[in-house]
Image (tube, grey):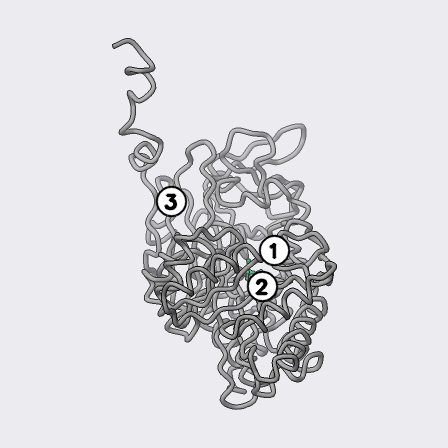
Amino acid sequence: MGAHIEAEEADDTGAGRTARRDEAVRAAVEQGLLGPDSPIVGLLDVTGIRESAAALRAAFDAVAAPGTPVLHAFAVKATPLVPVLRLLREEGLGAEVASPGELALARAAGMPAEATVLDSPAKTPAELREALSLGIAVNADNPQELARIDTLTQTAASRSPLGIRVNPQVGGGSIEALSTATATSKFGVALRDEGAREWVVQAFLDRPWLTRLHTHTGSQGIPPALMARGVAETYALAEEINLRAGRHQVDTLDIGGGLPVNFASDATTPTYAQYARLLAEEVPGLFDGRYGLVTEFGRSLLAKHGTVVARVEYAKASGGRAVAVTHAGVQVAARTVYAPGSWPLRISAYDAKGRPKDGPVVVQDVAGPACFAGDLLAEGRSLPLLEQGDYAAALDTGAYYFAHHYGYNSLVRPGVYGFGPQGSFAVVRRAQTVREVVAESGGAQVNALTQPPFGPA
Ligand SMILES: *Cc1c(COP(=O)(O)O)cnc(C)c1O
């Protein structure tokens, strides 16, 4: 286990990752995965994904008392691709799901119920019923949802571990939209609101079957110290509930995900080992073996292992600015295009043979294919000049990017390939076809609006 941590920390600089990526881009061009007729792909570094999963397990094993049950439930929303979930399952991880679609993906990947956690803020009665009948862990978001669970548990027995999500209201981070522990966040029971803490305690005392507390203080932009404070507050609440109950009623703490990702270089920082050590210092009781643990990391497991590579269709100049018009834009990087200040992406330049480009650096825009002016992956970026037929790679896009296609301009979803040693590739998701775009856009309902009762009989 210690060896895993050292392996990860030895590669914290990301040198291995950079070399693997360069090799994959060159092999993708050589093998025709990328080219004039296939101008954009998503690439996933399978070695890197395995290393991150191993580093996560090792980090918690190193601080938790021997025998502590720890489930690392990958937040499916970060990379909702079935083969990726299967890979993570093989690496010993579970799944955190927040919709019927995500649950179906986890099940398709073979995630067992006992390694699955359902957390969405808007679960319907049907979703709750399904989760309870499968035995999946459920965290109730609010009093109304708990009332639904009360009704369901009265009518049918369930193996599901059940808990309540709390919002410790410790504050937000640098990205408002991703800060879940602000005073007015929509998630969980806001603990500092008047009467709320007492309501949670009483909810547990009234329901012997409630055994978990859940918190997730936010994603990207939340400093680890603030995440740790949210965990500390949740731990303190568990201790209070158990004291008042006179028994070890809360037996599992779900501490959420949210470890920030470094988008500025290939280095992994912060590491899981650093975060686990921070938690062990700030909340020592968390790891003394009295509590089972669930984590829900998403971005930090996948972001740095994904790369979008797009061909430069045209290189032009506009108002004195060099502009590379590529095939990667808003459809694969919606966050960056609409909020470039919060979500800047690094771009690497490769030549037409897929080799890293060098040469004098030029200030240029890297544009996408969509028909609006703001469709830029990078604005005024200093890079070796991108020329027609070259490739631009958007780095760190393995989570919340190419797996989150946005159908603007009816641009097709690009294919996603996993890469391994010696230029080997596997299809993770094949590219969408134009025929599929038509079918998914009501192609079979072509006359729906022009036939009776809307049009002439
Ligand atoms: C989004 C989310 C996560 C994962 O967050 P990351 O920043 O991707 O690690 C975990 N838990 C819950 C409840 C979430 O909503």
- Label 1, secondary structure: give it: loop
Q: Give the numbered dot on residue 187.
A: 1
Q: Is residue 172 left or right of residue 15?
A: right
Tag on residue 165? 2
Q: Dot 3 surroundings within 10 Å: few (below 14), some, or many (20 or more)?
A: many
- Asked if disc 1 is less than 8 Å from ligand 1, the answer is yes
Q: What amino acid type should be assigned to the residue bearing mark 1?
A: Phe
Q: Give the mark nearest the N terminus, 3 or 1.
A: 3
Quarter of the figure with the C terminus = top left
Are dots 3 and 2 in contact, CB under 8 Å? no
Task: Tell me where residue 129 appears, x and y as whole percent.
Answer: 39, 58
Q: Label 2's element?
A: strand
Image location (x, y in percent) of residue 392: 51, 47
Residue 421 at least partly seen: no
Residue 204 is situated, as x and y percent measured from the top left of the image, at 58, 71
- Name the amino acid, label 3: Gly
> Pointer 3: what residue?
35
Assess whether mark 2 and mark 1 are in contact (beta carbons under 8 angstroms). Answer: yes
Residue 35 lies, with reference to residue 446, above or below; the image says: below
Q: Quadrant of ligand 1?
A: bottom right
**Outermost bottom residue:** 66
Q: Is residue 91 above or below residue 64?
A: above
How many neighbours does mark 2 have within 10 angstroms: few (below 14), some (14-19), or many (20 or more)?
many
As measured in the structure, the alpha-carbon distance from the residue carrying label 3 to the one carrying label 2 is: 48 Å
Q: Earlier in the sequence, mark 3 or mark 2?
A: 3
